[in-house]
Image (cartoon, helix red, strand yellow):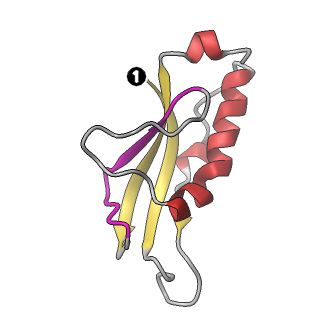
Amino acid sequence: LRSIEKFKDHHIVIKVVSSEACIAGHKEGDEFHLDAFGRVLQPEGGEGICIMALNKIWWRVMLMMERMAEGGELESKLFDLPMNCYGAGLPLGACGEIMMKVEVRKA
């Protein structure tokens, strides 16, 4: 809330940077937007984010929100490292695999 005025016109963007055998159909280049409060926004004419992907990336979103709240650096080597999303058991997990990055972007 300390930084909501500064970031009210920004989105936290989860971007799919690679995809292989994703059962939800997420593909490279897909983006999912959250507002500055962390609420998932409904995509225009698109599909929402899979709960497995959201579960895997939530801590990066929380870290980004903490950085926003303290007015800190939003670019970091940590955010450049993609996070994977997959289940267990099969080589690509039960649901395939996607790699995601998080960034803040002016809406």
Vertical comparison of 15 with 19: above or below:
above
Please identify the quarter of the rendering in which residue 5 is found: top right
For disc 1, the neighbor class at 10 Å (few under 14, some 14 to 19, many from 20) is few
Vertical comparison of 81 with 20: above or below:
above
Residue 70 percent across, percent down from the top left: 75, 21
Pick whichever, 96 or 48, lies toward us.
48
- The stretch of residues the image draws in magenta is 24-36
- Could you tell me which residue is drawn at 53 percent across and 66 percent down? 85
- Could you tell me which residue is drawn at 58 percent across and 32 percent down? 75
Q: Label 1: state its secondary structure.
A: loop
Vertical comparison of 81 with 74: above or below:
below
67 relative to 27 in the view: left or right: right
Residue 52 percent across, percent down from the top left: 54, 64
Main secondary-structure element of the magenta-colored stretch: loop
Outermost residue toward the left in this view? 45
Q: Quadrant of the C terminus?
A: top left
- Could you tell me which residue is drawn at 42 percent across and 47 percent down? 15
Residue 1 percent across, percent down from the top left: 72, 18
Residue 9 percent across, percent down from the top left: 48, 16
Amino acid type of the residue tagged 1 in the rendering: Ala
26 relative to 85 in the view: left or right: left
Please identify the quarter of the rendering in which residue 97 is found: bottom left
**Residue 100 visible in the snapshot:** yes
Q: Which residue is mark 1?
A: 107
Residue 35 belongs to magenta span: yes
**Residue 83 visible in the snapshot:** no
- Could you tell me which residue is drawn at 61 percent across and 59 percent down? 55
